[in-house]
């Protein structure tokens, strides 16, 4: 949420944005989608046509940019024409998906890069690091996928799917003739095994189970016939259809391993980084050819992938996908400029120089729109005592400030978001003010950006009894000087810039900000423990098109309810007894939204949630960068869309081909 977005969006759900400061990035594959002192990754909607101009590969503008706030990007947002739905063709007894793009030429390699870290495994279901998850997504397919133009769920390995009127029964039917890379048939038994054994029993990465379960309960999955499965969820759960994108595992390979005495440990090591590539059995367009640690990963096209071009020839076109492992973004840029890479995301600071190199470097810059990631300031609204120390988590004086809506909204109007966009992102980004990204079909378009208005901010503070005195400092109604300790992840030039800007902007109101950059792990521990006052933070959804992805952030008992995080008991359960009225309403809205199938009604529900967050300001949203991707002109059928930002536009890797220089 990815090398091929319809195989990846289910893998990673909401996680702390700044955690990526310490994670590897898969450049050309979308893991760079979040700003971490570098920038990248975006999603949005827009309209454009391509041009031959050296300084602009795209000509017209996009409404999504304005939805995200003010933006002065020199590149308009991509919006290629929708090629329409996939067609199915029977080829040698197999139901094949027919490509939607012009017929290309077979052969050649596409070269991308991985930043910083080697993949730890090629076992999708055991993968927990970003590099492994993203690479493995090229190797395995799921029952459904997401259309990169519409965001709608469409069949992938499934020939069809159906949701019964009861809202809890889902029937899927596999395509005829699907086979694993070793020639064994892919059947409904593989589907049932994946769900009932691997996921339900918690083999490998148990977070997959957390994503696909409903209120902690797994759906029942039964085999109807060789191609058909029936899923029954414990109750109506609207997002469940999207979870059917979870990759299917080869039962004939994995089940014997699980039956061993050391089954769980053996499964965890299955297809680890030291594997013999010949042992890897896949269903995706590629399989592993070679992995040279700290140097490169090579994927080889399979011969039995379930897709053909318009002439009936089996895809993919590209014989190999190459991923060079590079130490840092600067080295990555040098490799692209040295013609060692075919595709790479571009940091905002590098756009101006690359704009003038498009013709000589034989590439184009593509703007995939504002990122789905959010960067924000939050204040610790926890009003409780620490059960171990019997002292308040937050100084009671400051807790009153943080729990005052006027105080939070004053900060909202005092922050100069446009300055971040203009000075740090060089116009390659947008101001941010909503909980849902503008790319989401549930985005509340009635909400408008907050204006930078220090005078209005001061009037809000005065309503709550705050006064700026002759010494230039702000005091509350009890005479306490307003001074706040703000945490930020160390090592991020972006967070450093925003933090220093906050010091300046808040000084205009008389508020003293003490900025404390911390190692991410230390910062994360402090936030989780409740030992903090104010924090510069960020989140990124695994699925920007599904608001329920944020349930663990907005529900009062959510593990990521960061602004007022309740502690779990010894059994891991979180309870909330001091819920604010608007938090209670958010709890209700997210429960209703998850159980409502009608899209229009869901939109109303999620509009209200966004309005509440907008009004109450538990998060003070700041900015979002844009995803700019540089792609060689030799790449044909490369058609980036605003919903393919997690793949850096390579949503159709099976149909991309490479022309001679």
Image (cartoon, helix red, strand yellow):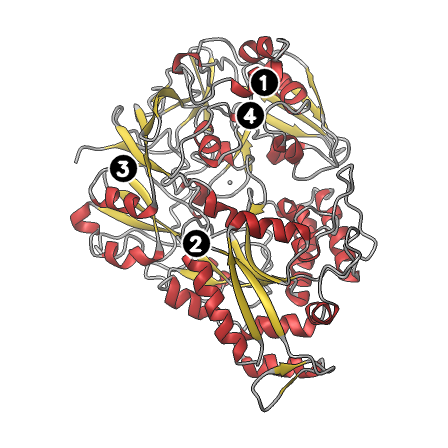
Q: Do the residues under discs 3 and 1 have CB atoms within 8 angstroms?
A: no
Q: Nearer the viewer, mark 3 or mark 1?
A: 1
Q: Residue furthest front?
A: 389
Tell me which residue sits at (44%, 38%) in the image.
Answer: 84
At mark 2, the secondary structure is: loop
- Residue 491 is marked as 2
Q: Position of residue 379 (x, y in %)?
A: 64, 63
Say which of 314 and 480 sits in front. 480
Task: Report the residue marked by disc 3.
Answer: 635
Look at the picture and state if 242 lies above or below 557: above
Q: Nearer the viewer, mark 3 or mark 2?
A: 2
At mark 4, the secondary structure is: helix
Relative horizontal placement of residue 456, taking residue 45 as reference (left or right): right
If you read the primary sequence from the N terminus, does the residue marked by circle 2 or circle 4 appear first?
4
Q: Nearer the viewer, mark 2 or mark 4?
A: 2
Pointer 3: residues within 10 angstroms few (<14), some, or many (20+)? some
Task: Report the residue marked by disc 4.
Answer: 125
């Amino acid at each position: 949420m990815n090398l091929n977005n319809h195989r990846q969006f289910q893998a990673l759900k909401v996680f702390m944005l700044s955690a990526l400061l310490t994670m590897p990035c898969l450049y050309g594959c979308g893991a760079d989608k979040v700003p971490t002192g570098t920038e990248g990754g975006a999603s949005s909607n827009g309209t454009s046509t391509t041009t031959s101009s050296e300084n602009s590969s795209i000509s017209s503008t996009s409404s999504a940019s304005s939805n995200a706030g003010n933006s002065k990007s020199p590149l308009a947002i991509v919006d290629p024409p929708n090629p329409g739905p996939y067609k199915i063709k029977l080829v040698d007894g197999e139901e094949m998906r027919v490509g939607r793009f012009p017929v290309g030429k077979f052969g050649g390699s596409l070269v991308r890069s991985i930043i910083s870290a080697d993949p730890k495994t090629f076992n999708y279901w055991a993968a927990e690091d970003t590099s492994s998850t993203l690479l493995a997504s090229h190797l395995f397919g799921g029952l459904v996928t997401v259309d990169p133009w519409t965001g709608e769920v469409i069949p992938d390995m499934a020939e069809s799917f159906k949701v019964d009127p009861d809202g809890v029964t889902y029937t899927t039917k596999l395509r005829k003739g699907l086979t694993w890379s070793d020639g064994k048939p892919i059947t409904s038994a593989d589907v049932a095994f994946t769900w009932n054994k691997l996921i339900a029993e918690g083999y490998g990465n148990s977070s997959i189970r957390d994503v696909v379960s409903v209120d902690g309960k797994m759906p029942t999955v039964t085999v109807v016939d060789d191609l058909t499965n029936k899923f029954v969820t414990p109750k109506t759960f609207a997002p469940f259809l999207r979870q059917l994108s979870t990759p299917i595992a080869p039962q004939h390979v994995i089940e014997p391993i699980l039956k061993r005495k050391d089954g769980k440990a053996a499964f965890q090591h299955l297809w680890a980084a030291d594997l013999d590539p010949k042992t890897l059995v896949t269903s995706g367009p590629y399989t592993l050819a070679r992995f040279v640690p700290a140097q490169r990963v090579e994927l080889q096209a399979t011969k039995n992938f379930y897709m053909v071009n318009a002439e009936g020839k089996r895809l993919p076109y590209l014989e190999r996908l190459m991923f060079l492992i590079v130490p840092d973004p600067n080295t990555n840029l040098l490799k692209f400029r040295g013609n060692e890479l075919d595709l790479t995301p571009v940091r905002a600071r590098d756009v101006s120089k690359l704009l003038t190199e498009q013709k000589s470097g034989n590439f184009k810059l593509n703007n995939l729109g504002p990122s789905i990631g959010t960067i924000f300031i939050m204040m610790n609204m926890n009003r409780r005592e620490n059960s171990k120390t019997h002292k308040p988590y937050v100084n009671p004086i400051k807790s009153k400030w943080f729990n005052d809506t006027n105080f939070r909204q004053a900060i909202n109007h005092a922050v100069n978001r446009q300055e971040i966009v203009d000075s740090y992102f060089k116009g390659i980004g947008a101001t941010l003010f909503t909980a849902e990204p503008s790319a989401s079909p549930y985005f509340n378009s009635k909400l408008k950006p907050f204006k930078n208005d220090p005078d209005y901010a001061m009037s809000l503070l005065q309503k709550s009894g705050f006064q700026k005195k002759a010494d230039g400092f702000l005091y509350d109604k009890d005479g306490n000087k307003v001074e706040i300790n703000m945490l930020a992840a160390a090592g991020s030039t972006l967070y450093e810039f925003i933090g220093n800007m906050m010091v300046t902007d808040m000084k205009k109101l008389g508020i003293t900000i003490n900025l404390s950059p911390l190692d991410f792990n230390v910062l994360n521990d402090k936030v989780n423990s409740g030992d903090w006052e104010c924090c510069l933070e960020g989140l990124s959804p695994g699925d920007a098109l599904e608001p329920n992805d944020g349930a663990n952030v907005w529900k009062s008992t959510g593990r990521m309810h960061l602004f007022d995080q309740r502690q779990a008991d010894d059994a891991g359960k979180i309870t909330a007894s001091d819920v604010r009225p608007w938090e209670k309403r958010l709890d209700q809205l997210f429960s209703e939204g998850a159980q409502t199938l009608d899209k229009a009604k869901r939109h109303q529900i999620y509009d209200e949630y966004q309005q509440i967050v907008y009004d109450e300001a538990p998060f003070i949203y700041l900015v979002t960068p844009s995803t700019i991707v540089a792609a060689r002109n030799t790449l044909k059928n490369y058609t980036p869309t605003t919903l393919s930002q997690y793949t850096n536009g390579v949503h159709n890797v099976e149909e991309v081909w490479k022309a001679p220089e």
